[in-house]
């Protein structure tokens, strides 16, 4: 993988560039704005760049790092320019819809592998990109009946060179897993914050909230557009886990009403055991 193109140079795209350049690849950046291109060059996240998507024609591997709702439109735009044998991967936080559409759009002789680095921050943009963002973090690559093992292995090798650990899974499993550990926790954190924000004691809650509240709700400070895309492109899995969560909260409510200390403690112990093992 000598020539790597990155479409979308924000937190994730910029971090891939910073690390890939350190590994000896020629990194071509394709951002949306001239200003981002200038910043990426200044920060050393890319070797060269262009606002013109046809520049992907020079790449062996293309990372699509735009917001989720733009991944498929951008793939459509770049498809006619891809060289034979080119591999395209993405970093979108949901996979089912993206991968099934992407596989249909790929021109003959090119390949798509869905990806999702389990690394991020609440702040976005190339200014906060880091070469070490993916160090020792899981990077999920998805496998379908159309995936060629050789292609998957090549993407795996590049992802490992970025410092990440690869885990393979099918797209349905990916979407169920991340709904449970990322998308529904975001929903719960955001609604916890809104519980405080909408309460009569909102001002006092804000004044008194300390590390516990901050830790529990950290992800609610993330990019609202990213959150919206996660919920809407992973609806089935998010709704399934939200229903389960609602049931669990109702069960806890009943136990608290009944003053059933033994069962409440059992629930808290179970949660502590699992949380401590992560
Ligand atoms: P980001 O920092 O906001 O970066 C998004 C980039 O996409 C920006 O560089 C932006 O360009 C570019 N972009 C926006 N609209 C565009 C358009 N119409 N055409 C071309 N480029 C456009 O966001 P991010 O956190 O890197 O997220 C990018 C992807 O990574 C998302 O798909 C997300 O699901 C995934 N992801 C994010 C995280 C996380 O924690 N943030 C974790 C894992 C995966 P400008 O700079 O020119 O505005």
Image (cartoon, rainbow, N blue to C red):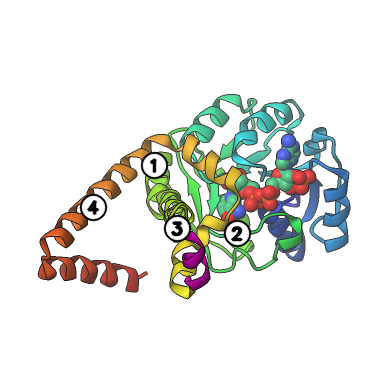
The residue at the point 63 percent across, 25 percent down is 108
Give the mark nearer the N terminus: 1 vs 4: 1
**Left or right of 89, for residue 182:** left
Percent across and percent down for residue 238 are 39, 42
Q: Which residue is mark 3?
A: 196
Instruction: Give yes or no for contact between labels 3 and 1 (Cβ–Cβ under 8 Å).
Output: no
Q: Which residue is mark 1?
A: 238
Percent across and percent down for residue 34 are 88, 44
The residue at the point 33 percent across, 69 percent down is 275
Percent across and percent down for residue 271 are 27, 66
Classify mark 3: residues with Cα within 10 Å, few (<14), some (14-19) or many (20+): some
In this rendering, the answer to whether 198 lies above or below 256 is: above
Q: Which residue is mark 2?
A: 122
SS label for mark 1? helix
In this rendering, the answer to whether 155 lies above or below 88 is: below
SS label for mark 2? loop
Number of marks in picture: 4
Along the line of sight, which residue is nearer the eye, 199 or 172?
199
> What is the spatial separation of the Cα atoms under label 4 and label 3, in whole angstroms?
21 Å
- Type of secondary structure dominating the magenta stretch: helix
Give the mark nearer the N terminus: 3 vs 1: 3
> What is the spatial separation of the Cα atoms under label 3 and label 1, in whole angstroms?
23 Å
Is the C-beta of the residue carrying label 2 under 8 Å from the nearest atom of ligand 1?
A: yes
Along the line of sight, which residue is nearer the eye, 7 or 237?
237
Q: Which residues are magenta?
A: 201-209
**Left or right of 45, for residue 227:** left
Residue 248's tag is 4
The residue at the point 49 percent across, 68 percent down is 214
User: Is residue 97 shown to the viewer in this render?
Assistant: yes
């Amino acid at each position: 993988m000598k020539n790597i193109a990155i479409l979308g140079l924000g937190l994730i795209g910029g971090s891939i560039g910073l690390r890939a350049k350190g590994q000896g690849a020629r990194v071509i950046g394709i951002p949306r704005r001239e200003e981002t291109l200038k910043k990426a060059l200044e920060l050393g996240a890319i070797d060269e760049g262009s606002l013109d998507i046809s520049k992907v024609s020079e790449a062996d591997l293309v990372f699509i790092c735009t917001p989720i709702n733009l991944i498929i439109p951008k793939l459509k735009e770049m498809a006619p320019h891809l060289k034979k044998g080119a591999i395209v991967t993405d970093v979108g936080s949901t996979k089912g819809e993206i991968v099934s559409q992407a596989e249909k759009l790929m021109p003959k002789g090119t390949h798509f592998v869905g990806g999702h680095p389990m690394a991020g921050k609440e702040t976005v943009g190339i200014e906060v990109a880091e070469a070490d963002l993916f160090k020792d973090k899981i990077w999920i690559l998805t496998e379908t009946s159309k995936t060629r093992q050789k292609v998957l292995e090549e993407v795996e090798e590049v992802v490992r060179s970025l410092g990440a650990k690869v885990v393979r899974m099918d797209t349905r499993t990916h979407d169920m897993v991340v709904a449970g550990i990322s998308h529904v926790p975001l929903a719960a954190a955001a609604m916890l914050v809104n519980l405080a924000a909408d309460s009569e004691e909102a001002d006092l809650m804000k004044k008194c909230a300390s590390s516990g509240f901050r830790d529990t709700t950290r992800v609610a400070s993330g990019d609202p557009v990213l959150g919206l895309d996660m919920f809407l492109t992973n609806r089935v899995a998010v709704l399934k886990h939200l229903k389960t969560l609602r049931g669990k909260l109702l069960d806890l409510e009943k136990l608290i009403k009944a003053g059933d200390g033994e069962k409440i403690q059992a629930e808290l112990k179970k949660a502590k055991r699992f949380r401590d093992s992560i």
